Amino acid sequence: MIIKSLKKGFSQLWQYKKIWVLLYSLTFVVAAFIAYPLKTYLENKIGTSLMIKDMIKGFDYTLYTDFMNHYGDGIAPIMNYSLLLIILFMLLFIFLMGGILSTFKNAPEKYNGKSFWSNAAHFFWRIFRMTIYFLFIHGAVLGLFFFIYLKITKGLSPMNLESEGIIFVAMKIMVPIYILFSSFFFMWHDYAKIHLVQNDNKWIFQSIIPSLKFIIKNIKNTWGLYLLNVLILMLLFIVNHFISNSFEITTGLSIFISFFISQLFLISRLGLKLVNLSSANHLFQENN
Amino acid sequence: MGKIVYTILLILVSFWAEAQKKRFSVPLSPRTSNYDIKVSLDTEKKSITGSQKVTFTNPSSDTIWTMPFHMYYNAFKNNLSLFNTGYSRIPRTISEDEIKKGIWGWINVDKIKDENGNELSFSFVQPDIDNKDDHTVLEVQLKEPILPYGNYILDMDWRSQIPKAKARTGYNRDFFFMVQWYPKLGVYEPAGSRFAKEGQWNCHQYHPVTEYFGEYGVYQVEIDLPVEYKTGASGFLLDESINGDRKKLTYLAEDVIDFAWTANPGFIEIVENWKGVDIKLLIMPEHVCNKDRFLKSAFSTLDFYEEYIEKYPYPSLTIVSPPFHGLFSGAMEYPMLITSPTLCDLPSGIKTTETLTIHELTHQYFMQMVGNNEQEEAWMDEGFTSFFEAKILDKYYPEGVVNFDYLDMKVNSKELRRGRFMSTNNPKINPLSDFSYTFKHGSSGDINYGKAAVGLMTLEGLVGEAVMKDIMQTYFARWKFKHPCRNDFEDVVLEVVTEKLGEEKAIVIQDFLQQLIYGTETCNYAVEYISNSLIGDPLGYFDDLDECKYPTDNKKETYQAKTVLFRLGEFTLPIEVKIIFDNGDEIIENWDGKARSHEFVYTGKRKIASVEIDPELKNPLDNNLIDNSYVIEQKETGIVRYFTSFMTWMEGIMVSATALI
Ligand SMILES: [Zn+2]
């Protein structure tokens, strides 16, 4: 069942590659809009300095400190503007979510732009509200883990701890547990959205509660599939880590290659995101 | 039976002989204040009972009637001590639990007798700040005076309650870190030494921001404590005896300004040898993973000084790596004993363990062998140690002190020191010449460490590495086992510079030191612009109104190539300027750096391609190195790398954030 759903995920990803392209283009454009002012600012403020040539070697501490001390005032507005654009991006992504899930649900022969956009608009507010609810849930889970961590490590206080070992050991044990535990809530969030789109419920609680029941009823399949998706994503991260560390950046060409690889990595991440949603959608449909 | 006795005797004799070998046959210092101390540590009550015989030799022709003693533990006696209130008289936060349980640290002298058995009276005095609740200086009234150049002996009985994990000292659980723990005699400054106009005791109260000052002497310290405790101390072990569940250890430290010791049953003892010096590392089992980092950095430092100044003269060095619950000991320096905390889980690219070991070990030279007054002129050891710390780290750890693969981050120690100082919010807060105990508002670290170290780096840039080494060697040779002040250092600098580089250079250096030590100004030179303008043919009417000169086709390609430099800071020093022309020519120009602006102009076929102030980075005090250069045609690949990296991060953040949708 899990494998079947996963396969379906990959096939739908390919079938609706236009969505994939759309997501990537959106990410690329917004990121370019964010990064461009920084480039202009650097060019204006320090563009004539010979120290620019040190930047090619990577992070230069002296350049960084002198830059922040003398021209750093211009960075905060750029960062604020970036934050604004990221929020805008998130809203757009929420908007697209309805279209994406409807496409997976209806499974048209080919990507249908018209129905994609109309469904996106149709579900926007409900998915938006659901995002807010789940933000609280994810925050509560994280807060709970943080609280337990502070309890175990006695507030990280050297006065109360025998040795620092517990600080790191607790971290090493709790992070995987957190990932495992919180993944359940992220998965729940996914199925709640799928449930919402499948049933076109008016109230989001009509989806949040039943989707939880569904997950628990099919826990082996749902969580199994979700963890498999997470595993593939982690593999992707590992592969990217090795590739990006395997060459040095010294020339314009290597900057280009490195940038190209990072874009491939990003495209793959977005692809896996779609695979995750599509496969979960398939699992949901098959079990209802 | 006889054989066993014989063997034991043999062991004892050889131990004794071994210990005797470690004594100096010729004293290194004047041995002005000598201590014979006996203490017993109560690990349950966290207290000490002690007695000490202090032998003082009057270094002056004065007749002295009083003797002041530092009673450092009394800084933790109440919430209104100078240490606990600073200058504001508002008590600093002390843990509720300790207040409720009445946990305070103190030291109390019960009885003082002179050599003739006279019982002497004593009282607390406040030489710096009039705060009667501060009991950190005890003044003893003598019945018979200390005669010029004469010896004087005192016997004191005292007790103390060890503070719980206070600044640098105290206990937590069963870790004891015993520093500034006994009544310590002030330093007598004869007229003409340091800032003394007439003979005077120098014995400040315990100020919150500064460290210590002590007189050279020999310490023989017998410590009685439970047998299971592992110990380390200044000096070397002279004698050891076990009696039931207690043991007595006798340490001898010669020609030192202080004595520190530590005890903890949990320590692992690692002993190595560096060219005849016993290196003892006291470390917790959970930190043993970093043992090589301690030893390698200690060995490198000792190697460095053997070559740069002179070989470490003492028979032993103890490095204490405190447990996590003993972090209150900080990273500190005491004669022949240093502390340097470590954590095994920190990434190997961060060289904190090495930095602290090298820094504290450097203090053996500056503050221990060259005994500056840390309370008045902390920069004369902290600035020096920070300067050398960077030198040693960058020599032995070329990979940098912060090193990550990501973005090829590699920061070396000199860069880090400069950057940290330049990033302080108020680099003009006070001059180095202010007495350190008056430093306020967090300026101590920025000025005593940062400004002084970067200033010394700049001095080295101005005189060159070889002359700097001469300066340090001369200063050390002249002032070892004495108490110099800044004037003495300045004298040595000017003397060496005059001799090696001439009087003209000495004037420049004098001006530099004046600004560095007594001023608060900052330094910044900048290249404002480059212009390459075509010099046109003469056009128009000149002598003859009948003849107008018109543009012709055979133009001469002659340019006025010019660059304008600005002085944006108040700190002035001579600077070198490298000018590169479009035909590849390179010239170095000199500017005395005094005027607010300056220009270099060239007429000819060449155009200026780039200008760089201080191309060899001799002046790290310049607070903006970005504006030190100007280039006409920029290669933008550097900016493109940052742009693409930043864009990639943003994409990554955005995609990660969609997990929340
Ligand atoms: Zn220091």
Image (tube, rainbow, N blue to C red):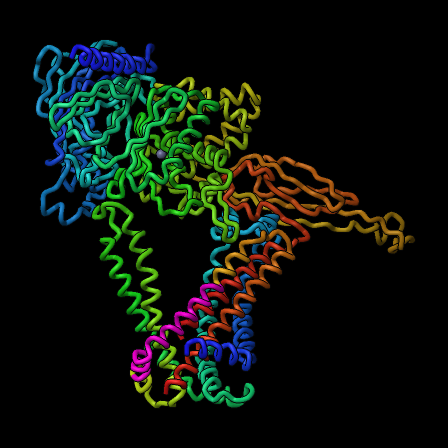
Specify the principal SS of the magenta part: helix
Residue A107, percent from left and from top: 49, 87
User: Who's the residue at 42% across and 76% down the image?
Assistant: A2
Query: Does the magenta portion include B636?
Result: no
Whether A74 is drawn above or below A127: the answer is above
Whether B614 is drawn above or below B380: the answer is below
Observer-nearest residue: B100 or A127? Answer: A127
Number of marks in the rendered image:
0
Observer-nearest residue: B651 or B563? Answer: B651
User: Who's the residue at 51% across and 28% down the image?
Assistant: B509
When asked about the image quadrant of residue B327, the answer is top left
Q: Is residue B188 visible?
A: yes
Q: Quadrant of the N terminus of chain B?
A: top left
Whether B576 is drawn above or below A159: the answer is above
When asked about the image quadrant of residue B142, the answer is top left
Query: Does the magenta portion include A230?
Result: yes
Residues rendered magenta in the picture: A210-236
User: Who's the residue at 44% across and 32% down the image?
Assistant: B388
Q: Which quarter of the rendered image does ligand 1 occupy?
A: top left
Q: Quadrant of the C terminus of chain B?
A: bottom left
